[in-house]
Image (cartoon, helix red, strand yellow):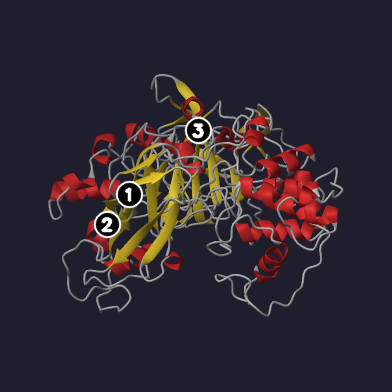
Amino acid sequence: MIYQNKNQMSDTNFSRGGDDLLITSPIHQLEDRRHRRHQAAWAGLALLMIGSFVALGQNGLLLTASILPTKQAPAFDGTVYPIEKVPNWVKLQSAEYKYSYEQIPASKMLNTPFYSADALARTVDTLKWGNAADDAVRNQKITYPVPYMGSYRLNGLENDGSHLAVDIKVPMNTPVRSIANGVVVKLANQTNGFGKHVVIVHQNVPSLEDPNTKTTYYSSYSHLGSVIINEGDIVLRGQNIGLSGQTGFATTPHIHFQIDRINAPWHPFWGFTYQEQVAAGLDFVGAINASLGKDKAYENTINPMTFVQRNLTTTPISTGSQTSVPNSTPAPTPTPVVTPAVADPVVAVPTPVTPTPTVISFAFNQKASYQLGEDIKMTLVAKDQNGNSVNALDESALLLLSGDVGNLSKADVTTGDLSDGQFVFRLQNPRVGQGQVTVMYKGVQTKSTSFDVINPTPTPQPVATKADLNRTKLFADVAGDEGFYDAIKYVKDKGVFGGYNDGTFKPDQVISRVEVLKVALKSSNRQILPTKGMLSYTDLDPNAWYIPYIATAQQNGITQGYIGGYFRPAQNVTRAEFLKILLLSSPVSLNPTVNNAPYSDVNTTDWSAVFAQFAKEKNLLPSTAHGFKANEEITRGEVAEIIYRLLVILNTGSNTYTAGLANS
């Protein structure tokens, strides 16, 4: 499954944990660059390409179209589950959740449970621990945390979103099998997205809609740890193709199991592009939850578990051989998992212990209502059964927001996020409405109380002066009494900072990295590179408007990317980050020595201290009543004001900004 941090387009990866478990990488739309060369045995053989290369995702990467092999697999003889055995999750001890496949005792393994949409839709609060029937449902919900066309609300409901695969939670090193006879048409290993994945084509198989009609399907298995087959291999039903892992954007081991129709233009298919997501004003999780691309998903994929279960066979699985199956790699026989007769300190459980609910409990500190325009933040509190603060989590906890009131600043909570048992998160791009936050940890849901986001309570406004009333309205939302009016007018007239197509400026809206780069470079009259230069970031659309600005900034040492090859163009910018970009873009001299803290919340050793010092000396900040606020996201209005003050200083030759200086 795929999950964004979140801060999906921020510098955080969109991943999270599931119903007791996982949720993975937030970026299925980022398919791999590589179109691998086929094996030597394929040299000279023509492939039938259906469609053409298709651009997808924020990178605009090229994806291979559907491919029909020149080889022919044995006739369809039924299906098997892609995973043969999974843990009996409700019987595992806490430590065993981290065990790999070979470490879990055989007595705690089960045949892969039946995939039932009705069972998955049951809510956790209807399940009783120790009840055999309820434990079976709980195992289904844990094994299949996100169903076909589900959402990241983790409610187990099919058709609640546009996640076009089924996620199967498994331990590391779990054998993964081909569901049916077929030919391997793609192996890929990418550092993001689907990670290491395999695509197998199955020809002349029963159509899911009409079993009497034959069709072609493509099954894919993503986030693998290792692969033991090659492109061009013929594989048989039940043949091992590799072992599970957590490659790509995956926070825990699992298999993203998907089946594409023959008409899908690439594999694994995804239902929406990054551009479509941004145009809809959604982050990655929000796009899935809002069912973005659902029609395309239905057109190009099927419910993979329904197909498998409709065609399950009890016919023994043939092992195949090099002579009977040309160019295939025989699947090694899995080593049986046997519980050691002698107690093993790593694997054995000395004394059976009845499973108990998690000892970590969560609570929310929040207000009943928030006003638009204020810093909307909440605190997640983690404690153990004795009421002590908890700073270590066994796996990521997932935060989910219900209600159309904005986006969470971060969707997954890890050990590194907790400080004294607390994690502070914010509501970004808030909208009027009612919301609620749910934290998911090891299958347990804890909900916050509902909160309201409301329009600010009207307060008496100062009577507009005659001068204010005579001011020209700059934008639909910037009239004469706007606090940043002079600054916005100045940068607008200079061609530095404009508004939106709808005629607004949105002075209270936060601003992204690429927007800041554009206005900072334009304010300094930097020559913008006409081409993208040598940009190798994996999360950029090479045809996007912002490429020349990033290339210019990179060439001039103004900004750089992040570890892992990301630039994070849509990430919101903090006050300190903006000042750094602006001042490094401008013809100013910075004193690298900071002897005295310029603000009460700045240490002389902070990386941002030199920029805060310059801002203090030049009076660049519009408000310093509560300190520098280095990590607070900056708004478009504040950006306009700071650029205005800096340009006025530079143009007048003054040492510091004072009101009225622009007219002197």
In the displayed structure, does residue 586 sit left or right of residue 268?
A: right
**Label of residue 143 in the image:** 1
Residue 568, compared with residue 596, is above or below; it is above
Instruction: Locate residue 57, reporting x and y percent.
Output: 62, 39
At numbered mark 2, what does the secondary structure look like: helix, strand or loop? helix
**Label of residue 260 in the image:** 3
Image quadrant of residue 185?
A: top right
Are dots 2 and 3 in contact, CB under 8 Å?
A: no
Image quadrant of residue 121?
A: top left
Amino acid on which disc 2 is placed: Trp
Instruction: Locate residue 611, reporting x and y percent.
Output: 69, 66
At numbered mark 3, what does the secondary structure look like: helix, strand or loop? strand
Q: Marks 2 and 1, Cα distance to the nearest angstrom?
A: 8 Å
Amino acid on which disc 1 is placed: Thr
Q: Is residue 146 visible?
A: no
Q: Marks 2 and 3, Cα distance to the nearest angstrom?
A: 30 Å
The local crowd at label 2, few if under 14, some if 14 to 19, many if 20 or more residues have their Cα within 10 Å, is: many
Amino acid on which disc 3 is placed: Asp
**Label of residue 235 in the image:** none
Are dots 2 and 1 in contact, CB under 8 Å?
A: yes
In the displayed structure, does residue 480 sit left or right of residue 105?
A: right
Q: Which residue is mark 2?
A: 89
Instruction: Locate residue 112, reporting x and y percent.
Output: 31, 48
Mark 3 and mark 1 lie on one chain; the one further toward the N terminus is: 1
Mark 2 and mark 1 lie on one chain; the one further toward the N terminus is: 2
Residue 70, compared with residue 102, is above or below; it is above
Q: Nearer the viewer, residue 450 or 243?
A: 450
In the displayed structure, does residue 111 sit left or right of residue 614?
A: left
